Amino acid sequence: MKNLQLGISAIVVIIAGLVYGFNPDAVLAALIGIDLRDLELKHIFKGMMGLYLAFGIFWIYGIFRPPLWKAATLSNVFFMGGIAFGRGVSLLLDGFSIHFAIAMILELFMMFWGLHNLTTKNVRIN
């Protein structure tokens, strides 16, 4: 069960990364109405894709390489907590968005699940 949190996180983050990066013009415009005609915005979203893919792959690697499980889970906790924090700040300062409020709740859930796994699973790192 300790790997389920990493696996779900990896799948969701890899899919989000691909959505952000491959064709953000069409996908983000259709999903949430963002217009990405600006070249710099396209570069930002491609960079986010790379970051999301890297973390997702690392979390999968942590599932299959037990010595890296703790590092993968800890990075997941910081990743999910960091995104949730940023969304919370935006909700307070920029206004309410149901899509991103739901995302923030799910990210907080994944963060706390990861913290739970880190504190309850006695994993020995060689």
Image (cartoon, grey):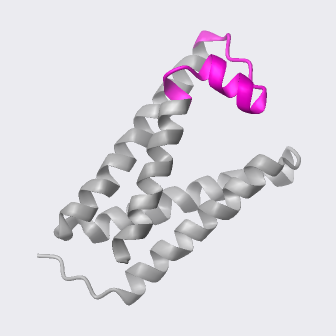
Q: Nearer the viewer, residue 22 or 91?
A: 22
User: Residue at horizontal 34%, vertical 56%?
Assistant: 59
As for residue 25 lying within the magenta part, the answer is yes
Residue 28 versus residue 42 in the image, above or below: below
- In this rendering, position of residue 24 left or right of residue 56: right
- In this rendering, position of residue 123 left or right of residue 99: left
- In this rendering, position of residue 6 left or right of residue 65: right
User: Residue at horizontal 55%, vertical 27%?
Assistant: 45
Coordinates of residue 119 in the picture (x, y in percent)? 41, 86
User: Residue at horizontal 44%, vertical 43%?
Assistant: 14
Which stretch is magenta? 20-39
Residue 121 versus residue 76 in the image, above or below: below
Pick the quarter of the image with the N terminus. Answer: bottom left
Question: Is residue 74 among the parts visible in the rendering?
Answer: no
Question: Is residue 100 among the parts visible in the rendering?
Answer: yes
Coordinates of residue 9 in the picture (x, y in percent)? 46, 57
Coordinates of residue 113 in the picture (x, y in percent)? 51, 75
